[in-house]
Image (tube, rainbow, N blue to C red):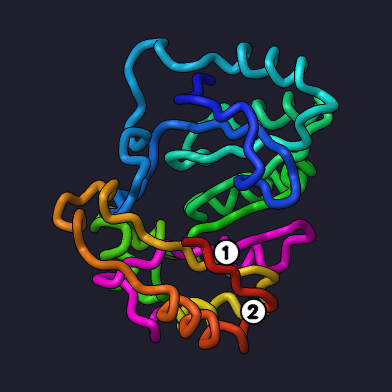
């Protein structure tokens, strides 16, 4: 397994823990607002960071770092992810996974094996196929959409810390859409509303467009509050 890169220590990517962040390549969605578009496709050749190097680093940092975050791209597209998690767990680390929820069968396996301590799932839009299709840049099969719905149901029942989150883009998300997402994840422990940064958007047509204000986010948080236990705003 080769990784696109590493942040050697972060206080923000794994809430409450000091963690290393590992970036994987490849994603099955093409969200127009994506700010990690350089990770969407797997690079040919062996120029990325070998897992062996990462494991050596993590061995040295035992007792200093608490956890490891897999993000991307979409980590669950990587067939070697599970074994990488096994090896990292053997070093005593907590593991957080950032995912778009398109591979629920792998989530089940990772949960059953006790490899996950925290999952953050991106919910791209209200659970309407056309809305989700647009938010995924038109790269969404009916199977993918079903998988996303299954992952939400699975994670709502999971015995670990689960966070759902949405990057809010005015051209894709109305305030009512955000309320609908909260309703779809009713009972969730945490729903995070994330600001969209247009300057780094993959779709050049979104660059320079306006974003919702802090007041708008607070209004959306109020709309979501009846459905989830906690709403968090990240600007």
Instruction: Identify the image quadrant of residue 228.
Output: bottom right
- Count of numbered marks: 2
Q: CA distance from mark 2 to mark 1?
A: 10 Å
| Residue under the image location 66 percent in, 46 percent down | 14
Mark 2 near mark 1, Cβ–Cβ under 8 Å? yes
Q: Say left or right for 197 vs 22.
A: left
- The numbered mark at residue 164 is 1
Q: Quadrant of the N terminus?
A: top right
Q: Residue at x 76, y 57 (%)?
A: 160
* Residue 135 picture quarter: bottom left
Q: Secondary structure at mark 2?
A: loop
Local secondary structure at mark 1: strand
Badge 2, how many Cα within 10 Å: few under 14, some, many 20+?
some
Q: Is residue 37 magenta?
A: no
167 drawn magenta: yes
- Which residue occupies 68% across, 16% down? 57
Residue 55 is situated, as x and y percent measured from the top left of the image, at: 68, 17
In which quadrant of the rendered view does residue 197 lie? bottom left
Residue 69 seen in this snapshot: yes
Res 228 label: 2
Q: Which residues are magenta?
A: 151-177
| Residue in the picture at 26% in, 50% down | 199
> In x, y percent, where is residue 225?
60, 84
Which residue occupies the foreground of this view, 230 or 144? 230
The numbered mark, 2 or 1, whose residue comes first in the sequence reads: 1
Outermost residue to the left = 205
Q: Residue at the front extreme?
A: 214
Q: Nearer the viewer, residue 230 or 137?
A: 230
Counting from the top left corner in percent of width and height, residue 119 is at 64, 52
Q: Position of residue 161 (x, y in %)?
A: 73, 58
């Amino acid at each position: 397994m080769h990784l696109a890169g590493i942040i050697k220590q972060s206080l923000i990517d794994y809430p409450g823990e000091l963690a290393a962040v590992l970036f994987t390549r490849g994603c099955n969605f093409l969200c127009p607002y994506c700010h990690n578009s350089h990770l969407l496709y797997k690079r040919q050749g062996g120029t990325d960071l070998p897992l062996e190097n990462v494991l050596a680093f993590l061995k040295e940092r035992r007792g200093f770092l608490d956890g490891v975050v897999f993000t991307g791209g979409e980590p669950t597209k990587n067939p070697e992810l599970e074994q990488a998690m096994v090896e990292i767990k053997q070093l005593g680390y907590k593991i957080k996974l950032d995912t778009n929820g398109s591979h629920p069968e792998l989530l089940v396996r990772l949960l059953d094996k006790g490899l996950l301590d925290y999952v953050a799932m991106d919910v791209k839009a209200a659970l309407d196929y056309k809305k989700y299709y647009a938010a995924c840049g038109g790269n969404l099969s009916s199977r993918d959409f079903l998988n996303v719905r299954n992952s939400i149901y699975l994670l709502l029942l999971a015995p670990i810390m689960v966070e759902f989150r949405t990057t809010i883009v005015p051209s894709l998300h109305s305030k009512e859409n955000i309320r609908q997402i909260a309703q779809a994840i009713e009972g969730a422990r945490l729903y995070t509303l994330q600001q969209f940064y247009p300057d780094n958007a993959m779709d050049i047509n979104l660059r320079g467009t306006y974003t919702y204000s802090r007041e708008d986010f607070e209004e959306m948080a109020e709309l979501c509050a009846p459905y989830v236990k906690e709403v968090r705003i990240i600007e």
